[in-house]
Amino acid sequence: MTPLRTLLLLGAIALTVAPALGHPTAPTAAELARGRMLVAFGGCNDCHTPGWRESDGAVPVQAWMSGSTIGFRGPWGTAYPSNVRLRFQEVDESQWLAMVRTRAGRPPMIWHDLRALDVADQRAIYRFIRSLGPAGVAAPNDLDPDQTPKTPSYELVPSSPPPP
């Protein structure tokens, strides 16, 4: 085999194997559209986009997923919706996929629902949000149960013990 044919064959193999190994490729328009739909339909904006609930979802996409200073307070303490756009500048796609597989967190974050999605959908969410670029500021740090938030918060207190 000639050196050129060997090089072409190795290139073709790399292009075929790399996506299967989780090496990121450039997002397609279809992936970005899918990610946008999943973020909207999955309720991500409900917590992670300032003013989403108050505006009945009329927040421009340029402001989506930039975190919130409104906390969610319950027996676990107070959790603040992170600025996912800033976070996705710090983690790569493989780190995001690992977070989805392994992470748990304080309510109301729904890591368990993200795990129910297939990898292509999890990847589409990451790629869409990352495509928006960084915006906003970091959300406040979560607070322990004995700390009182200095920001507005929703009180989420169960009326009865959760089922086992």
Image (cartoon, rainbow, N blue to C red):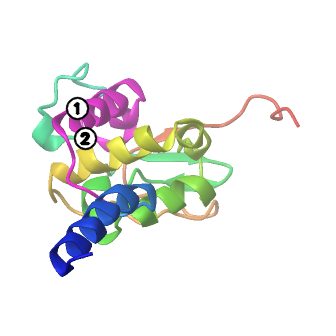
Magenta stretch contains residue 5: no
Residue placed most toward the observer, 85 or 79: 85
Question: Residue at left 50%, top 54%?
Answer: 79
* Span highlighted in magenta in the image: 24-52
Position of 91 with respect to 65 (left or right) is right
Quadrant position of the N terminus in the picture: bottom left
Q: Nearer the viewer, mark 2 or mark 1?
A: 1
Which residue in the rendered view is the most extreme toward the right?
Answer: 164
Cβ atoms under marks 2 and 1 closer than 8 Å: no
Specify the principal SS of the magenta part.
Answer: helix
Residue placed most toward the observer, 137 or 38: 38
Position of 157 with respect to 94 (left or right) is right
Q: Quadrant of residue 6?
A: bottom left
3D distance between C-alphas at marks 2 and 1 = 26 Å
The label on residue 102 is: none
Element carrying mark 1? helix
Question: Counting residues from the N terminus, which is met first, the one under dot 2 or under dot 1?
Answer: 1
Q: Is residue 53 above or below residue 138?
A: above
- Would you name the residue on which mark 1 appears? 30
Q: Quadrant of residue 12?
A: bottom left
Question: Residue at left 30%, top 27%?
Answer: 37
The crowd level at tag 1 (other Cα within 10 Å; few <14, some 14-19, many 20+) is few
Question: Residue at left 30%, top 36%?
Answer: 35
Q: Is residue 138 visible?
A: no
Quadrant position of the C terminus in the picture: top right
Which residue in the rendered view is the most extreme toward the top?
Answer: 56
Residue 101 appears at what percent x and percent y? 59, 54
The label on residue 50 is: 2
